[in-house]
Amino acid sequence: MPSSRKRRPRLVLDSNVWISAFLFGGKPAAIIKLAQEGRVRILVSTDLILEIARVLRYGKLRKILEQSKRSTETVVAQILAVTELVGTKSLRSWITQDPADDIILNCAVENSADYIITGDQHILQLKRVDGVKIFTPNEFLQHLQTNK
């Protein structure tokens, strides 16, 4: 008998979405909550974790973390608690303006994600890459609501 359970969407979140979720809440945090509830699967690569950790060490963000009594390591542990760690074999070049964005795109494409969630205009302007749809957090939540 076939399962009536729908396949959970597979997402890759850009570092800006993770940072917004953990430091400021809002729509990015709502996506993390969906993962905690088991409604979506969030994929993350080691390279993406390293990128998030690097960005969190920037002066302004580091100060915000310190004020909230959190550390980069704490945020990384929280990310790992709600994600599926996946590998990436190659680093295909997608975006010449910001090669760090390639980390997100390669993670999504190589691991058959359904969606990339980002606030980055370089990525958003692509709209789709190798079948992976690209949305802002708000667009994704609206899409999910519409396609229940």
Image (spheres, rainbow, N blue to C red):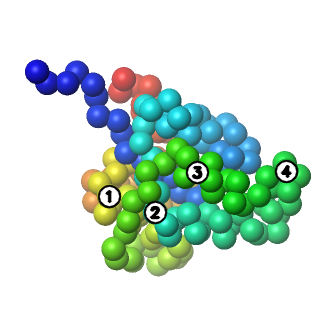
Task: Please give the label number shown on residue 69.
Answer: 4
- Provide the secondary structure element on which disc 1 rests: loop
- Provide the secondary structure element on which disc 3 rests: helix
Q: Name the residue: 69% across, 60% down.
A: 73
Res 45 visible: yes
**How far is the residue under mark 4 from the one under mark 2?**
26 Å
Where's residue 53, x and y in %?
Answer: 65, 65
Residue type, numbered disc 4: Lys
Mark 2 burial class by Cα count in 10 Å: few <14, some 14-19, many 20+? many
The answer to whether mark 1 and mark 2 are in CB contact below 8 A is: yes
The residue at which mark 2 appears reads as 45
Q: Name the residue: 63% across, 57% down.
A: 76
User: Quick one: label 4 or label 3, which is nearer the N terminus?
Assistant: 4
**How far is the residue under mark 1 from the one under mark 3?**
18 Å
Mark 4 burial class by Cα count in 10 Å: few <14, some 14-19, many 20+? few
The residue at which mark 1 appears reads as 111
Q: Quadrant of residue 28?
A: top right
The answer to whether mark 4 and mark 3 are in CB contact below 8 A is: no
The image quadrant where one finds the C terminus is top left
**How far is the residue under mark 4 from the one under mark 3?**
17 Å
Residue type, numbered disc 1: Asn
**How far is the residue under mark 3 from the one under mark 2?**
11 Å
Res 124 visible: no
Q: Name the residue: 55% across, 46% down.
A: 81
The answer to whether mark 3 and mark 2 are in CB contact below 8 A is: no
The image quadrant where one finds the N terminus is top left
Q: Nearer the viewer, residue 101 or 11?
A: 11
User: Quick one: label 4 or label 2, which is nearer the N terminus?
Assistant: 2
Residue type, numbered disc 3: Ile
Mark 1 burial class by Cα count in 10 Å: few <14, some 14-19, many 20+? some
The residue at which mark 3 appears reads as 79
